Image: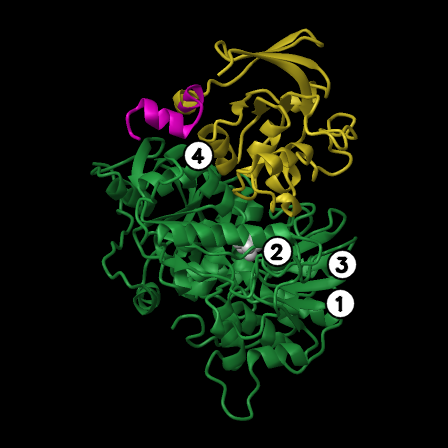
Chain colours: A yellow, B green
Amino acid sequence: MLDIIRGKAYVLGDNIDTDQIIPAKFLSYNPSDPSERKYFGMYAMDGVPAGQMGLPDGNIRFVKPNEFKSEFSIVIGGRNFGCGSSREHAPLAIAEAGVRVVIAEFYARIFFRNCVNGGYLVPYESPERLMEITHTGDELVVDVKRNLLSNVTRRTEHKLSPLGDVAPIIEAGGVFEYAKLAGMI
Amino acid sequence: MAGMTITEKIMAKHSGRASVSPGENVWVNVDVLMTHDICGPGTIGIFKEKFGPHAKVWDKNRVVIIPDHYIFTADDKCHRNVQILRDFVREQGLIYYYDPEFVKNEPGMPNPYIDPTRTSYKGVCHKALPEEGHVRPGEILLGTDSHTCTAGAFGQFATGVGNTDAAFTLGTGKTWLKVPPTMKFVFHGQIPPYLTAKDLILAVIGDISVSGATYKTMYFAGEGISSLTLEDRMTLTNMAIEAGGKNGVCDVDDKTLRYVRARSRIHDYDVFRDDPDAKFCYEQEWDLAAMEPLVAKPHSPDNKDTARNCRDVKIDQAYVGSCTGGKITDMIFAASILNGRQVKVPTFIVPGSTEVHRDMKQLNLHGRPKGPGEKSIEEILIDAGCRVGPSGCSACLGGPPDTFGRLQKTEVCISTTNRNFPGRMGSAQASVFLASPLTVAASALTGHITDPREYVSSPIETGMAGVA
Ligand code: SF4
């Protein structure tokens, strides 16, 4: 896992569900096939309604049409991020678009678990309502060792909640890697 | 030792410990793992990548594969995905696989779906799991689908997981779980004829919000729950995920045992009950006599209102289906209102499973085998002007553009399904109201949202429908 993650922020609101992150019509792509997997990057956040895409403006696409990667590499969300279905395609799509860390107030359980066990994203929780004070496009730096977020554009610093008991799995890179280190498999 | 809840006892037993408490992480042995056509291919891919191309599943009697999501479509990737499941089943020698034989691994619409009794195709996994005897009290069921929590109605721990988790369990038979604290919802009184479990769960979700049960168990208790059929209890536990719950659970009673005995090949399971001093992180009591038919307005399952208050909302379409509202009892509820009347808006009926569809053809309005001259449930619905589609997930999650009942534009739909997020049933411009099958049927008759009390006065019998 990287210790320092830098990039531009993409800001979303509360209750971002998995149908918004990756709409069901794209689920027929097989994520285990590399030639199909990249389409999850192309369609990441495709279901976020107009007005909510990239706050506060609300009309900034996460991934430009016909591209596979996003120019944003840190996603900021509100409450209950990733609610809805159990589709692992959701964290996978965000990661496939080039994101390494998501920061939300709290997560829906299965999304959080998929981030951790699949080793896709570092799912940070923030005690502050960052979605209200961060703008899409702000330059951010996340210091994973110190659980600290710096907003370079606004010159502010924000404490992030420690990753807690899932930190060893995140550090290992996922549940398989963790189980290997622990001698389970 | 502190008292434990049902969920804590199940986790303790499966982790080989005398007791567990909320917040602890434990490694548990899994009894059954289920996957389907949407998440199966990804799960199989990770399984092979991590355990090697020749790896075998941990126990071929404990893996259940149920294609259900994208079956009746011309999208050839969907058919390819079913083929990936078939290949895996053959290679691993899996026993419990329910193939849609009529779907060929080639482009174009599948052959017409004619007689479900001639194929092993089942329909929606959460309905098929209990029907086919894969749920039992006291067990742990994982599925690659968030509504796996449905099976908690049978007194087991059931929850949804992602592909990586499922692949890990496929190879090891284990998973790690954080022991959830339990929220207790007690329902007093008997279910009145104008309410179904859907109204109860919409009330709870509206009360605690779509994240009110995040990381927690939702335990539904009280005589009100005992008064529900097992199928209606499944509606409650099914929607635990809509409040963010990790699992939902009900007590095991005679109704549960009768169902499980009739269906399961395994008769060795544990019936756990809460200790008298079990701890709950939240307790709420509801009086069924004081509750009203509800809807969840667009675009969130917690956006609750009474059906009565929404009578000015005009609808373009009605939908009865899904693992939440496509069971045989749901069909009887809808048919009892539609019987002898005509719908005013296009009304789509999707049986949750091929068994439900068979029962719709064979049972009468009271859930008993139809006699000579009597109409079947399906005949009642068709005569009322409804369209009956093939069983499966269908438009519950939108699906490919040619999906039966899918919302294509800016329609307003009232539906017995479980989610009304933007775009969930197809078009992101459409609006979905969630409601009970009674409210959906009453609204289909008038063309606007309608309180079913205008049509229901006496109790609706469902007999043994859906049980044996
Ligand atoms: S019927 Fe709907 S909610 Fe149920 S498993 Fe299918 S898509 Fe999911």
Residue farthest bottom in this picture: B372
The residue tagged with tag 2: helix, strand or loop?
helix
Chain of the residue where label 1 is placed in the rendered structure:
B
Does A53 sit above or below residue B207?
Answer: above
* Mark 3 closeness class: few <14, some 14–19, many ≥20 residues within 10 Å: some
Do discs 4 and 1 share a chain?
Answer: yes
The span picked out in magenta is A169-185
Give the Cα distance between marks 4 and 1: 52 Å
* Residue A88 magenta: no
Which residue is labeled 3 in the image? Answer: B313
| Upstream in sequence: badge 4 or badge 2 | 4
Locate the C terminus of chain B by quadrant: bottom left
Which residue is labeled 4 in the image? Answer: B49
Give the residue displayed 48% in from the left and 61% down from the top: B99
Give the residue displayed 66% in from the left and 69% down from the top: B442
What is the number of callouts on the image?
4
Task: Name the magenta segment's main secondary structure.
Answer: helix
**Quadrant of the image occupied by residue B183:** top left
The residue tagged with tag 3: helix, strand or loop?
loop
- The amino acid type found where label 1 is placed reads Gly
Give the number of the disc on residue B447: 1
